Amino acid sequence: MTAPKFYITTAISYPNGVPHIGHAYEMLATDALARFKRLDGFDVRFLTGTDEHGIKMVQTAAREGITARELADRNVPHFQAMTTALNCSNDDFIRTTEPRHYAASQEIWRRMEAAGDIYKDSYAGWYSVRDEAYYAESETEVRPDGVRYGPQGTPVDWVEEESYFFRLSAYQDRLLAHFEANPDFIGPDERRNEVVSFVKGGLKDLSISRTTFDWGIPVPGDPKHVMYVWVDALTNYITGVGYPDVDSASFKRYWPADLHVIGKDIVRFHAVYWPAFLFSAGLEPPKRVFAHGFLFNRGEKMSKSVGNVIDPFSLVEHYGVDPVRFFFLREVPFGQDGNYSHEAIVNRINADLANDLGNLAQRSLSMIGKNLDGVLPSPGTLTAEDEAILAVADGLLPICRAAFDGQQIHQALNAVWGLVADANRYFANNAPWQLRKTDPDRMATVLYVTAELIRQIAILAQPAMPDSSAKLLDLLGVSEEGRLFAALGPAGRLVPGTKLPTPAGVFPRYVEAEATPSEA
Ligand code: ME8
């Protein structure tokens, strides 16, 4: 039987600067979703990349006295390096300046044109360079500073130029019918409701080309025009699986995408424009679009002028990649806005990781090392308590799967850390260190059960913390194959008699640098 497929993407980032924590957050969360599916037996394809065209790139480059291409070439390597620093498992990294993407974008344009959905007219209206978005006047407001702002709080400029238009208005009913028939198309529900009311409010045709600059993909047959950056940006998702070759094995296998993970500011593009373009081109829409929230530094928006922009590379350098991944995934309910601060990160590292999971593993495994020559014991007859806690562990996969299928990553981690807490209580109540003399057989059983709980916790922690979970599974002598979700539950129980490696700490405590001298 061939594995079912799962095609997942992040938004592609504008490389008009270096990556920030919002980019890192989206990337690591999407990676956790991708890893979960792989471990659960899916043939996963995970795409990320950079969105390099558009006026925003042109303007930033001009300010720096370089070309947009030079700006992209300078910043893209930082985005690529970030995927490595965050230990992301993306299968591909697309740059919208690649020839394969020009071919895909020009083909989707031709298809939309052939469908009668593209016409030439002239555009006069408001445009936000920061959002790369057109807004109706009713969506904008003039603030006391005399500047007109769009709905996301970015300034808008008046634009008037000849432009091609996409007949978005023709897709209003079809989009509404699609939302109705596919209640899971947009998540979370709040975002879905916003989109439905936006579409119900009436769709205007969309300007999809520009003539006042040339940093973009030329419009087929009219190279004076370049495509509106969002037409080309959204198309990356099909370029990444081989479009325009719709007969290619990869396009046939992976399209439609199963999940586009994006931030809440770009839902309209993904849930309205993108499916309309695809309908027009005769292609299937993605199955689901999920919007995560925004991250704030202690409640404040990150901004260069406030000086609270945190570089994802230094975060990883400082706390370690797995603690950073774990912190964001456990702390911020996925889909909601979240906050981060040094204290909150340290608290998660020391409480959830070092104390709760790290100590439990260290104490139980070193008892096996010291008292049982490092050989996993055979459990004796299981008590009701043993059976009950093993049943909790054996029942976690469906809970985690349901959570991940709704992108509720934090709920899955809550369930797993619920077992971590249970396992700590179990270990403390059974006090195997006291049983050593009084009832060595019972001690062996308690140590076996504890090790077995840690095995299942580590398997389920892999999507969030791939490296640390691997270290734990190494300490338990679990084979590569034994790390897949198929090995969860009774099917993959630890094998008594296995000789374990010498235990080593996996989750060090975070110690404040300032504290070191006084402690020394
Ligand atoms: O929007 N917190 O690119 P981008 C969380 N090129 N997420 C954030 C964030 C924050 N503070 N700031 C940004 C674009 N993001 C387009 C996408 S897709 C075909 C084209 C998220 O570099 C943002 O919501 O501005 C988006 O999903 C991603 O980072 C890239 O943002």
Image (cartoon, rainbow, N blue to C red):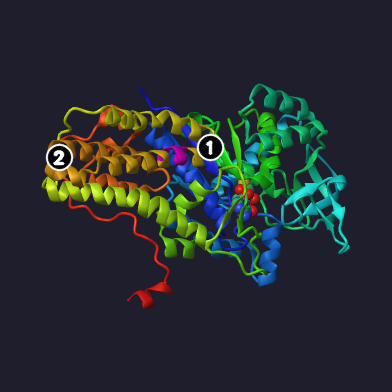
**Magenta span has 263?**
no
- Counting from the top left corner in percent of width and height, residue 187 is at 62, 35
Graded by Cα atoms within 10 Å as few (under 14), some (14 to 19) or many (20 or more), the crowding at tag 2 reads some
Q: Which residue is mark 2?
A: 498
How crowded pointer 1 is (Cα within 10 Å; few <14, some 14-19, many 20+) is rated as many
Front of the two marks 2 and 1:
2
Residue, far front: 438
Q: Which residues are magenta?
A: 412-416
Q: CA distance from mark 2 to mark 1?
A: 37 Å
Which residue is found at the position 81% from the left and 47% from the top?
135
Where does label 1 land, which residue?
407
Q: Is residue 323 visible?
A: no
> In the picture shown, does residue 238 fall above or below 216?
above
Between 479 and 209, the one nearer to me in the picture: 479
Q: Is residue 360 left or right of residue 414?
A: left
Foreground pick, 226 / 394: 394
The residue that appears at 38% across and 38% down in the rendered structure is: 419
The answer to which of marks 2 and 1 sits earlier in the sequence is 1
Q: Name the disc covering residue 295, or none.
A: none
Helix, strand or loop for disc 2: loop
Q: Main secondary structure of the magenta part?
A: helix
Q: Secondary structure at mark 1?
A: loop
Residue 335, picture quadrant: top right
- On the rendered image, what quadrant is the N terminus found in? top left
- What residue type is disc 2 on? Thr
Is 226 rendered above or below residue 248?
below
Residue 142 in percent (x, y) is at 88, 56
Q: Quadrant of the C terminus?
A: bottom left
